[in-house]
Image (cartoon, helix red, strand yellow):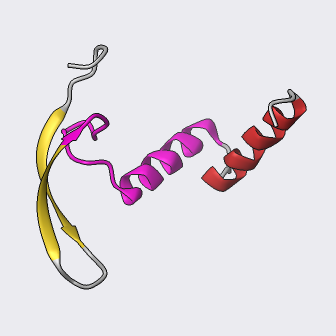
Amino acid sequence: MVAGCTVVRRKLTYQFRNRTTEVRGVGLIFTTEDGKPITREYIRWRWNKVCGAAEIKLTPHQLRHTIATLLIGDGWM
């Protein structure tokens, strides 16, 4: 347990560019609701769901630029 977080232990299979695979035991801090690893597809699905509920069209890349602009405006960069 880390600061109120539960680490979920899983074995994940990694596939490398040279087509070899390796199984590793990992501790996941951020998971889906059912304890599975968060994938790129899951993040995209959640992002679209939240943006749809808020009735906005915004990509993660656009958000990145917005945050950078705000930080520059506040003198952080």
Residue 25 located left or right of residue 77: left
Locate the C terminus by quadrant. Answer: top right
Question: Is 50 rendered above or below residue 57?
Answer: above
Relative to 57, 16 lies left or right: left
**Tally of numbered discs:** 0
Residue located at (46% from left, 54% from top): 44
Q: In the rendering, at what x and y percent does residue 10 appear?
A: 12, 46
Q: Residue at x 34, y 55 (%)?
A: 39
What segment carries the magenta color?
Answer: 27-55
Q: Quadrant of residue 56?
A: top right
Percent of width and height locating residue 9:
12, 39
Judged from this view, the residue extending furthest toward the top is 4
Q: Say above or below: 55 vs 11.
A: above
Kindly give the residue lying farthest to the bottom in the view shown: 18
Give the quadrant of residue 30: top left
Instruction: Verify whether residue 30 appears in magenta.
Output: yes
| Residue 29 at x, y percent in the picture | 28, 34
17, 52: nearer the viewer: 17
The quadrant the N terminus occupies is top left
* x, y percent for residue 15: 22, 73
Determine the image quadrant of residue 52: top right
Residue 59 is inside the magenta segment: no
Looking at the picture, does residue 36 appear above or below residue 15? above
